[in-house]
Amino acid sequence: MSREHQHPRDHTEPPSELVLRVKALESLLIGKGLVDPAAIDALIDTYEHQVGPRNGARVVARAWSDPAFKQWLLEDATAAIASMGYSGQQGELIRVVENTPTVHNLVVCTLCSCYPWPVLGLPPVWYKSAPYRARAVADPWGVLQEFGTELAEDVEIRVWDSTSEMRYLVLPVRPAGTEGWSEEDLAALVSRNAMIGVEQAKSPQAIGRG
Amino acid sequence: MNGAHDLGGMHGFGPINPEPEAEEPVFHAAWEQRVFGLTRAAGALGRWTIDMSRHARERQSPLDYLRQTYYENWLAGLETLLVETGLVTPEELATGKATGLADEETRTRVLTADNLASALARSSSVVMAADTPPRFKPGDRVRAINRHPPGHTREPRYVRGRPGPWAAGVAVPALVLGW
């Protein structure tokens, strides 16, 4: 099938006003000698392809596997995480909060979108959205339900409101039935959403290993 | 400031409707990529702090802040800061045409593909060494000051005047709420 058949229109849509505004700003800043477009390409590539929640999943998997590392992570997360090579901007100070059978942690940034970039990458749209920011601190049970997360009634929920200076990572409860698993296999159970606290770690069954 | 960004506890925004994690792209449009990259690259020029960049987004009209998407708010904040710091003139912003190069000192700070890795690794922590002992220790009961500064604050409205534990063991307070 030719491209024309897939896209029968014989013209492309004109760029929106917003797209033109961004293009104009970029060409202005290049013209002023203030930005290098190659650096912008590299920035985009870094956060689109290199830094992301797989980093955080490896941190969680190590904490599940190595009690000494876990203790270090809970006492000085920034240093413990940096020892795995994850550090830098928007992650200068990270605190890890541990889920247990009786405590569940949930992270939000009500004022903006603060998030631990070195371990989770850039935040998802919903994390930055008005509904999540408004409700996470007022109705965390309802928020968790919307993500399909059911907790026992006696579980205490702690909500952590991030700031630019202090960003949080949730250490989920290690799923049952994973004794003896390698860190690499364990990391496959750790979703981004579990490290924000809106979900729990996946079960072995959920990834076809039950 | 008591802006539209201070969303904690507000009603009426409806469901979150999250995209499934496995299907959500990091960016949803090419222009979002450029706004992200431009904002980070311009920030590397060192003319404003993270607080200033947040305040530039927050002090838009509340109607604009809530109507616009996230990266539209970044774009608006970036344009404000570029003009306020004199890096571009209002005329240049309006026309998109540079009337000349930026000064030489500023141009020495430009982020390049070569110096990007070292720039990203550089810590820009704002935690400062204190020369006085802290007034509070973790676990102390404190009450948040009820104040309404016109500038940027990290104290959201929903905690003002409220009691709570001082939860952090570091130089910045943590806001933690128990249910």
Image: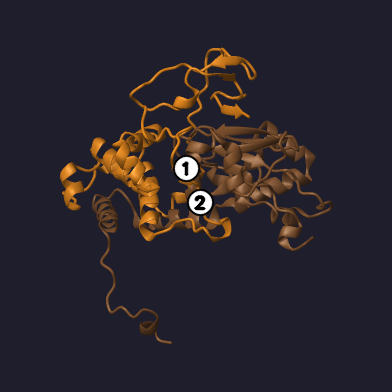
| Residues tagged by mark 2 and mark 1 found on one chain of the structure | no
Q: Chain of mark 1?
A: A
Label 1 is placed on what type of residue?
Pro
Image point (37%, 42%), residue name: B43
Image point (24%, 55%), residue name: A24
Q: Quadrant of the C terminus of chain B?
A: top right
Could you say where residue B123 lies in the image, as x and y percent from the top left? 50, 37
Could you say where residue B36 lies in the image, as x and y percent from the top left? 39, 50
- Marks 2 & 1, CB-CB < 8 Å contact: yes
Q: Is residue B95 left or right of residue B113?
A: left
Residue A171's disc number: none
Q: Chain B appears in which tint? A: orange
Indicate whether B123 appears above or below A56. above
Image point (20%, 52%), residue name: B96
Q: Chain of mark 2?
A: B
Identify the residue under disc 2. Answer: B17
The image shows a total of numbered marks equal to: 2
Indicate whether B81 appears above or below B38. above
